[in-house]
Amino acid sequence: MKEGIEIKVFGKVQGVWFRGSTQERAQAFQLTGWVHNEPDGYVLIRAFGKKTDLEKFQEWCATGPLHARVDRIEVQPIDTEDYPTFEIRRK
């Protein structure tokens, strides 16, 4: 069954290829949804897929890519939305 989570990632997470790495990791876990930078300096992610894959993805988000420094993440369940892929959104 498909589930959804929203993740806010805080720390040094902009300008370190966090969104691109997030997209690659989400695709590896066969998740759909999106990621984008927020003006306040954090990264916002909405991901949808199987519970076990979302849990693994959430674990990865707590560390992030090599040059990121994740101070904390906030995770909450959200209603499922339909997306064909996992995309990077730019505002």
Image: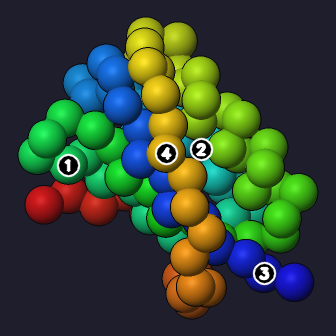
* Residue at image point 73% right, 76% down: 3
Earlier residue among tags 3 and 4? 3
In the picture, the disc for residue 38 is 1
**In whole angstroms, how far apart are the C-alphas of marks 2 and 3?**
19 Å
**Callouts 1 and 2 close, C-beta under 8 Å:** no
* Sequence-earlier tag: 2 or 3: 3
Instruction: In the rendered structure, find residue 70 and report the number of the disc placed on it.
Output: none
Nearer the viewer's eye, disc 4 or disc 2? Answer: 4
Q: Residues within 10 Å of mark 1 (few under 14, many from 20)?
A: few
Q: Which residue is mark 4?
A: 74
Give the quarter of the figure containing the C terminus.
Answer: bottom left
Asked which quadrant contains residue 83, the reply is bottom right
Given the image, on which type of amino acid does mark 1 rest? Glu
x 64%, y 52%: residue: 26
Pointer 1 or 4: first along the chain: 1
Q: Is residue 51 left or right of residue 67?
A: right
Label for residue 24? 2
| Spot occupied by residue 61 in the image (x, y as percentages of width and height) | 58, 35
Check disc 2: other Cα within 10 Å, few if <14, some if 14-19, many if 20+.
Answer: some
Q: In whole angstroms, how far apart are the C-alphas of marks 3 and 1?
A: 26 Å
Which residue is the site of mark 3? 2
**Which of these two is toward me, 39 or 91?**
39
Q: Residue at x 56, y 76 (%)?
A: 78
Lateral position of residue 52 relative to residue 33, left or right: right
Gap in Å between the C-alphas at discs 4 and 2?
A: 21 Å
